[in-house]
Image (cartoon, helix red, strand yellow):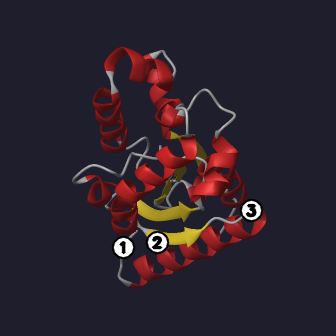
């Protein structure tokens, strides 16, 4: 694979899925740089188009409206190829979304323990779903609800504390998926 941005633009998108705090954005930025692909963060793109932060979208319009915005983001193409896309933690957790995202490119789901996630996100006020009195309990509840969707959405891997090994693992998966697609005559 190349770091040539013109050539990378023809590669299928790589979607990083999983719960908040699993490292999707950190991993995504590094992989995009390694592969010469464009990096997009679905939450940042939604904030840009809405003109407000995610927490404000939740407060003003509710979670369902935000989930509609996520779906529209995926359906829009953003573009159709050459991007590493870090997706919001709940993006694939609605009926039809795992299939929609898988149909747009290569999907890898990052998993971490509830304790690791809590440590990573507990200091942020930008996480409305865990901005509660006991975040570890809420994280466990949400993981129990979301894990079946995550497992249907893509190839699942453990995102340990070593970001370098996680990046390398995701890159190996992406390259293997590209080889399989080419062998089948797909992009």
Left or right of residue 122: residue 107: left
- Residue sitting at 52 percent across and 21 percent down? 53
Report the residue marked by disc 2: 155
In the displayed structure, 166 sits above or below 15; it is below
* Residue 32 location (% of width, % of height): 65, 53
Q: Earlier in the sequence, mark 1 or mark 3?
A: 3
- Residue sitting at 60 percent across and 62 percent down? 113
Report the residue marked by disc 1: 186
In the displayed structure, 111 sits above or below 74; it is below
In this rendered view, identify the residue nearer to me: 127 or 51: 127
Under circle 1, the secondary element is loop
Under circle 3, the secondary element is loop
Under circle 2, the secondary element is strand
- Residue sitting at 54 percent across and 53 percent down? 9
Report the residue marked by disc 3: 161
Of badges 1 and 3, the one in the foreground is: 3
* Residue 97 location (% of width, % of height): 29, 52
- Residue sitting at 67 percent across and 58 percent down? 31
Residue at the bottom extreme of this rendering: 183
Left or right of residue 175: residue 100: left
* Residue 75 location (% of width, % of height): 30, 43
Specify the quadrant that holds the C terminus. bottom left
């Amino acid at each position: 694979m190349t770091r040539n941005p013109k050539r990378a633009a023809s590669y299928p998108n790589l979607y990083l899925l999983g719960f908040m705090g699993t490292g999707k954005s950190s991993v995504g930025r590094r992989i995009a740089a390694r592969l010469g692909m464009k990096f997009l963060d679905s939450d940042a793109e939604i904030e840009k188009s809405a003109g407000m932060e995610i927490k404000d979208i939740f407060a003003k319009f509710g979670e369902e409206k935000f989930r509609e915005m996520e779906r529209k983001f995926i359906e829009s193409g953003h573009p159709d190829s050459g991007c590493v896309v870090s997706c919001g933690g709940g993006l694939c957790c609605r009926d039809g979304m795992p299939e929609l995202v898988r149909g747009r490119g290569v999907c890898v789901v990052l998993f971490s323990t509830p304790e690791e996630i809590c440590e990573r996100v507990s200091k942020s006020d930008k996480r409305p779903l865990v901005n509660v009195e006991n975040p570890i309990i809420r994280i466990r509840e949400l993981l129990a609800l979301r894990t079946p969707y995550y497992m249907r959405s893509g190839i699942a891997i453990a995102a340990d504390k070593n970001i370098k090994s996680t990046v390398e693992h995701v890159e190996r998966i992406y390259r293997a998926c590209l080889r399989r697609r080419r062998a089948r005559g797909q992009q």
